[in-house]
Image (tube, rainbow, N blue to C red):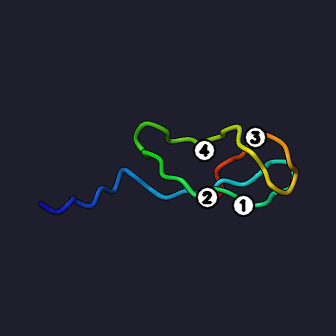
Amino acid sequence: MAKRSNEARIVVTMACTTCRERNYISEKNRRNDPQRVELRKFCSRCRSHTSHREMR
C-alpha cells in the first residue's frame, strides 16, 4: 500500500547562525513545532558545533 501524502510534515533547510551557510535539510511536523526549529549541529565552514536555525 502506498504512503499517503501528509501536509503536516514539511521539508526545512537548516542554516548556521554564525556564518549563515545552509548545511542541513530535514523534515519537521508543522503541528508539533509551529515555530522555527533550532538545533546544535556541526558546521563544516566554522569547523565546530554551532546552533543551526530553520530558514524559510
Q: Quadrant of the C terminus?
A: bottom right
Q: Quadrant of residue 19?
A: bottom right
- Specify which label sits upstream in the sequence, 4 or 2: 2
Determine whether the residue tagged by mark 2 lies in a helix, strand or loop: strand
Query: Between tags 4 and 2, which lies in front?
Result: 2
Q: Which residue is mark 4?
A: 36
Sort mark 2 into few (<14), some (14-19) or many (20+) by Cα contacts within 10 Å.
some
Q: Quadrant of the N terminus?
A: bottom left
Q: Is residue 34 above or below residue 43?
A: above
Q: Which residue is mark 3?
A: 51
Determine whether the residue tagged by mark 1 lies in a helix, strand or loop: strand
Task: Answer with left or right where residue 13 lies relative to residue 8.
Answer: right
| Residue at position x 77%, y 51% in the image | 16
At label 3, the amino acid type is Ser
| Residue at position x 33%, y 56% in the image | 7
- Image marks 2 and 1: residues in contact by CB distance under 8 Å: yes
Determine whether the residue tagged by mark 3 lies in a helix, strand or loop: strand
Q: Quadrant of residue 22?
A: bottom right
At label 1, the amino acid type is Arg
At label 2, the amino acid type is Thr
Q: Which residue is mark 2?
A: 13
- Specify which label sits upstream in the sequence, 4 or 3: 4
At label 4, the amino acid type is Arg
Q: Is residue 34 above or below residue 9?
A: above
| Residue at position x 84%, y 43% in the image | 48
Cα–Cα gap, marks 4 and 2:
11 Å
Determine whether the residue tagged by mark 4 lies in a helix, strand or loop: loop
Sort mark 3 into few (<14), some (14-19) or many (20+) by Cα contacts within 10 Å.
some
- Image marks 4 and 2: residues in contact by CB distance under 8 Å: no
Q: Which residue is mark 1?
A: 22
- Image marks 4 and 3: residues in contact by CB distance under 8 Å: no
- Specify which label sits upstream in the sequence, 2 or 3: 2
